[in-house]
Image (cartoon, rainbow, N blue to C red):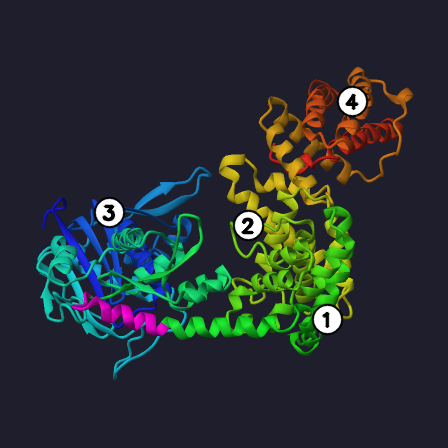
Amino acid sequence: MSATARRDFLVEVGTEELPPKALRDLELAFAGSIESQLNQSGLKYRQLESFSTPRRLAVRVRGLVEQQPDQQLKRRGPPVRAAFDAAGEPTRAATSFAATCGVELDKLERETDPKGTEYLSYSGMRPGTPTADLLPGFVTTALAALPIPKRMRWGAGEAEFVRPVHWLILLFGRETLTARVLDTDAGQVTRGHRFMAPKPIRVTAPASYDRLLLTRGKVVAHFETRRERIRLQVEEKAASLGGRALINPALLDEVTALVEWPVPVAGRFEERFLDLPREVLISTLQDHQRYFPVQGAGGELLPWFITVSNIESTDESVVRAGNERVVRPRLSDAAFFYEQDRRQPLRSLRAGLDTVTFQAKLGSIGDKVRRIEALARQIVPVTGADPARAAEAAELCKCDLLSSMVGEFPELQGIMGRYYALADGLNTEVAEAVREHYLPRGAGDALPSTPAGITVSLADRLDTLAGIFAIGQKPSGTRDPFALRRAAIGVLRILLEHRLPLSLPEIVAAAVRAQPVQDTAAIPAEVQAFIMERLRAQYLEQSAATGITTEMFDAVLATEPTTVPDFDARLHALAVFMREPAAASLAAANKRSANILRKSAEAAPVHVDAALLHHPAEQALHRVVADTQPRVEAAIAAGQYNEAFMHLSLLRPEVDAFFDSVLVNDPDAALRGNRLALLARLRSLFTRIADLSLLPG
């Protein structure tokens, strides 16, 4: 077998219909594991492709070498002194090492490490394993590692997978590998579309796999190709109706995972349903029916939708009529719920919140609303919201949870509250705040924009964080049932992007005090630490662009800034400063100062006595610190941290000269104490912005 010969490899696992929302993740995880194992084994290849449809996961590797390269082995054994006894006879350590290397004892070598210790060692070549012998194991390992929360069994076998497996292809070139995976013997036969091409299809070479499925099986095997085909088809169909399709990326992915042979079909609904709020129509069509809504040139919704069928029908009108028949009662229900809700003002639902549990130890949703309202009153001085409007928005923010519409369409919470508040003639900002207090709903989502919305959004999230931490239910590992990480990120985004100087320690403490829980003394610090760790993660995600490191974050954190915008300004100023030539030297000096002060057996005096400054270098440092301090303090007071660092960087010559020339721990107690006081003053000047002693250098 030639070490340079290459073949294509194909693995396909055929199943019953896979869960659509997990399909893409399963495909990518399967391909990623195969790729990782090939690379770890030193198996070279030209290209790796993955495929997925509702009934299959597949990976094709083009130009895969037929055999692993031979591997040079180099192993170190026991020290010679332990490998042989006093009589020179080999000990068990020596014979065991030789056995694990697969050679006789006299084939072992000796080597000496830099410390002069002599060891037994082995050098040799291990022949590469044929690729065909490795591939079944790679596939088994990859399938076992897939992110499947709950596996199922089928038939009388012991195999477990996300869905029952019906066929398996393991094809290396034209050779079918002998293997049994998931209680299924490998073969060459795949299946096409369940109804349009039900006959088995033999795959004789991996290169023809997707072409055979397309031409004979009525299956578009490649996920991205199928996704793009659906997008174009839906857009073309919408254009033919005189509109534009609203294509939600998540819905497009889900539909792609539901069909193997996409065929767009347009359907129509009664125009009277256009009187419903836009979000109600979109939610009904998109979230509940997996249809793509259509809107006109002016942005108004049209009485059309587009569905994607998984079959070419001989009579498309039948498919259209079936989908129209299904959506009509859904829209009728929505219209009924909307009319029912409009019969009573939104405020009338407020009392009912006292009967709905938020969390057993934290009371009802009504209790939570009262806490939100109280917390909002403490936040309005910072957000600039009208106190009365913020209080009213807080009072009404959860009322629509008891509406019929939100009971049927939970994703419309807040949105329906806004519509009902406007219908009741309430202030526009109050109505907007009812909707906005749920923002941001996720990563990249819009933030609340009205002062009242910003206020209530912060109060709601801070109350949730404080309450759940107070009852000991903080997130652990990947488990976060109350979405506290998302709540913390929402708080941080609002504070940062709106540049709100809200004191985080004060508002967190207020939120914790409002909880109906005893013994919460340690909780504010825990909540704040949790929020700051989310902030750390955000900065580190952008570190390639900003240059911000975790050490820089810790340096600023050590100074305990109370507001998030102030923290942000300090951190970005520090990142700029660290690119300056003086930064490394000053960081090292700060680290040295911190160590000297920490190790000193005596406390540094509060003031520096100029009369005790004998050495020219300490006199110069004292003068420049005294001269620089007011400039630095003025810049810090104005929030001009870049300017403050510029003044501090000018201290470098005197700082370097001091440490080069002056003995801080002088035998004379008076001189020693005075120099410690000078170091303490210098260090205090630097730690006003960030603790440089925590930085490398």
Residue type (three-letter) at the residue carrying disc 3: Gln
In terms of depth relative to the viewer, which is nearer, 666 or 325? 325
- Dot 2 or dot 3: first in sequence order is 3
- Per the rendered image, the range of residues in magenta is 312-326
- Give the amino acid type for the residue marked by disc 2 in the picture: Ala
Q: Are marks 2 and 3 in contact (CB under 8 Å)?
A: no
What residue lies at 73% left-to-right and 56% top-to-bottom?
390
Residue bearing mark 4: 628
State the CA–CA distance, disc 4 to disc 2. 44 Å
Q: Residues within 10 Å of mark 4 (few under 14, many from 20)?
A: some
Q: Is residue 299 above or below residue 559?
A: below
Counting residues from the N terminus, which is met first, the one under dot 4 or under dot 2? 2
Asked if residue 289 lies in the magenta stretch, the reply is no
**Which of disc 3 and disc 4 is earlier in sequence?**
3
Q: CA distance from mark 1 to mark 2?
A: 28 Å
Mark 3 and mark 1: Cα distance apart in space: 68 Å
Identify whether 335 is placed above or below 133: below
Q: Residues within 10 Å of mark 2 (few under 14, many from 20)?
A: few
- The span from disc 1 to disc 4 (Cα, nearest Å) is 53 Å
* Label 2: which secondary element: loop
Q: Amino acid at mark 4?
A: Thr
Q: Compute the Cα span from label 4 to label 3.
A: 63 Å
Label 2: which residue? Answer: 446
Q: Position of residue 446 (x, y in %)?
A: 55, 50
Q: Disc 2 versus disc 3: distance between alpha carbons?
A: 54 Å
- How far across and down, in percent of the image, does residue 619 sit? 82, 18
Label 1 close to label 2 by CB (< 8 Å): no
Q: Which residue is mark 1?
A: 367
Quick one: label 3 or label 1, which is nearer the N terminus? Answer: 3
